[in-house]
Image (cartoon, rainbow, N blue to C red):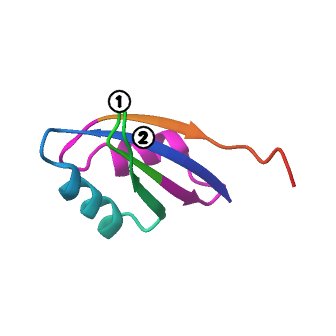
Amino acid sequence: MQNIFVQIKCELGKVYEVAEALVDNIEETEDLYSISGAFDLMIKFHLSDEIDIGRFINEKVQTVDGIKDTFTIMTFKAFK
């Protein structure tokens, strides 16, 4: 299994709609946070090793209405 975090910038006034759509429609969603700074949301996805991260972001995340931009952070198990 692999975990990734995706920071999401939403269109103005669309944060709550985007958050609902992500949680309701993407089963790999593990946690969703509202954040401050350049992005509005940060979401943690728990993906099986067979899933292509680029396709997943392109086809499942970036196609959600109201998303303006994304920034993906890949994680690596470095410590026990």
Q: Which part of the image, by quadrant, shows the C terminus?
A: bottom right
Task: Decide whether residue 62 is among the magenta residues.
Answer: yes
Residue 52 percent coordinates (x, y): 55, 46
Label 2 belongs to which residue?
7
- Would you say 65 lies left or right of 61 here? left
Q: Earlier in the sequence, mark 2 or mark 1?
A: 2
Determine which quarter of the picture holds residue 24. bottom left
Residue at the location (78% across, 48% down)?
77
Towards the viewer: 39 or 5? 39
Q: Amino acid at mark 2?
A: Gln
What is the span of residues highlighted in magenta in the rendered image?
44-68
- C-alpha distance separating marks 2 and 1: 9 Å
Asked which secondary structure carries label 1, the reply is loop
Q: Which part of the image, by quadrant, shows the N terminus?
A: bottom right
Residue at the location (45% across, 48% down)?
56
Residue at the location (82% across, 44% down)?
78
Label 1 belongs to which residue?
38
Q: Does 35 sit above or below residue 45?
A: above
Task: Decide whether residue 56 is among the magenta residues.
Answer: yes
Q: Amino acid at mark 1?
A: Ala
Residue 37 percent coordinates (x, y): 37, 33
Check if mark 2's residue and mark 1's residue have beta carbons within 8 Å: yes
